[in-house]
Image (spheres, grey):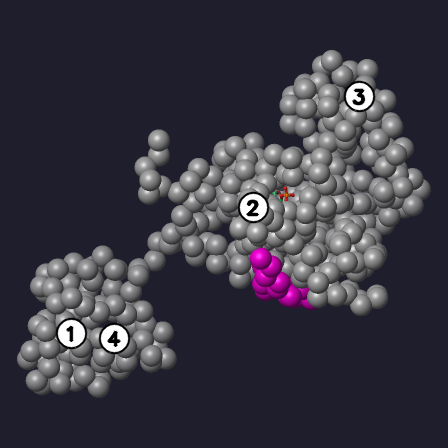
Amino acid sequence: MAPANEPLPGTSDIWEPDVREWVCLETAARDIFARYGYGEVRTPIFERTDVFVRSLGDETDVVQKEMYTFEDRGGRSLTLRPEGTAGTMRAIACRGLADGEQLRVFYMGPMFRGERPAAGRRRQFHQVGVEAVGGSDPCEDAETIAMLVHYLDAIGVQGGRVRLNTRGVPEDRAAVSAALRQHFEPQAAAMCPDCQRRLSANVWRILDCKNPACQALVDGAPKMVDLVGAESRAFFAAVCRGLDQLHVPYELAPRLVRGLDYYVHTVFEVVHSGLGAQDALAGGGRYRISLPGNKKALDGVGFAAGMERLLMARESLGLTAQARAAADVFVVALGDGAVVAALELAQQLRRSNAGLRVLAGLGARSMKAQMRAANRAGARWALIIGDNELTAGTVVCKNMAASQQESVRREAVLDWLTAASRA
Ligand code: AMP
């Protein structure tokens, strides 16, 4: 049994300096997505269960096996969000979208899936994602993929490969399902029990199966683009043309369907060789979602990238945050009377415009203990206040690396630090 103070399997505590890596992903997302007209939305971490079941599809792995669902005291079934699109769509439907209005939003934050934890597969993981809602132009799909590639470039994740396919429109589904069934049915005996059940329940799901025996059969399955109707083929061709025009490299992935039922037309993912078995950095596509209270289904296009995986990809490329000192300045207080003076000086320095990070040795410990604390914090300067300094209105300013010190009038300490930081 894991010790009680360890985080649960598949969850993590995130500490400095890793937190700065996260902030870097978040800052770049805000910067890049804003350039494409996206604004941030923050939706609740839990929703009514049917928000997810309705939009993800009840035959999906996420809904069937992975959701953290619980009852609240009123007996309502609630679920921790397993992904960001369904909640965002619920929020947009609640806010309202005027006829013809288009909306672009991005989100980032924790998602929850009860999967078996492995490298790159967590139970609480984080996604950064975007949704462009209300449009239906294939160029928007190309633009969305181009933005994802732009974002990956901005965070230094080189080497991602875009894989692209179409799922067609709902009107194509019967014909596609029939063709897939015709391909798989004669080989049912060779398939895993889940896929044997999927043959009648939802034959598309077989294309996502990771079982090697099923994968071998999937490789011989007909290509989606050959099964869908003329309208879907034309849409897909337009997306490809858009990507060519924007010089975004991509590969055709003729049997990629992605796990969720709400997708129509374009589906894509970005894979990266630095990730190992779970090699998907991001996935997305065009979708059509109908929500309670909304007469018309909402059309949109979006993607979500796994932030843990973005960090793994960065790490595989040698990009990691360096440990950083906790403080620039440590104010040492010797004697009870000096503690308040030390705190006052620390506060004055923090509130100055010098941007100094300052710790004060509160708790009246020995000089040796406080200098050790200053070293541990990585401080470049120690400012020492004892009884003599209190009386004289001075501070002993010490350069930690050079072990040089001098007595400075209290009001001149900031100038001394400014000059020292330029030296
Ligand atoms: P999905 O919502 O399943 O399309 O996933 C989008 C992206 O989220 C994937 O490409 C992964 O990068 C990431 N992701 C999905 N599930 C997990 C998980 N359990 N742990 C870590 N990252 C995940």
The residue beneath circle 1 is 339
- Which region is colored magenta? 29-44
The residue beneath circle 2 is 71
Closest to the camera, between mark 3 and mark 2, is 2
Does residue 192 appear in the picture of this structure? yes
Q: Quadrant of residue 343?
A: bottom left
On screen, 322 above or below 103? above
On screen, 304 above or below 419? above
Label 2 to label 1: alpha-carbon separation: 52 Å
- Report the side of 71 relative to 197 (left or right): left
Q: Splitting the image into four quadrants, where does ligand 1 fall?
A: top right
Label 2 to label 4: alpha-carbon separation: 49 Å
Label 3 to label 4: alpha-carbon separation: 72 Å
Closest to the camera, between mark 2 and mark 1, is 2
Please state which amino acid type lies under the numbered disc 2: Glu
Instruction: Say the numbered circle drawn on residue 102.
Output: none
Q: Quadrant of residue 133?
A: bottom right
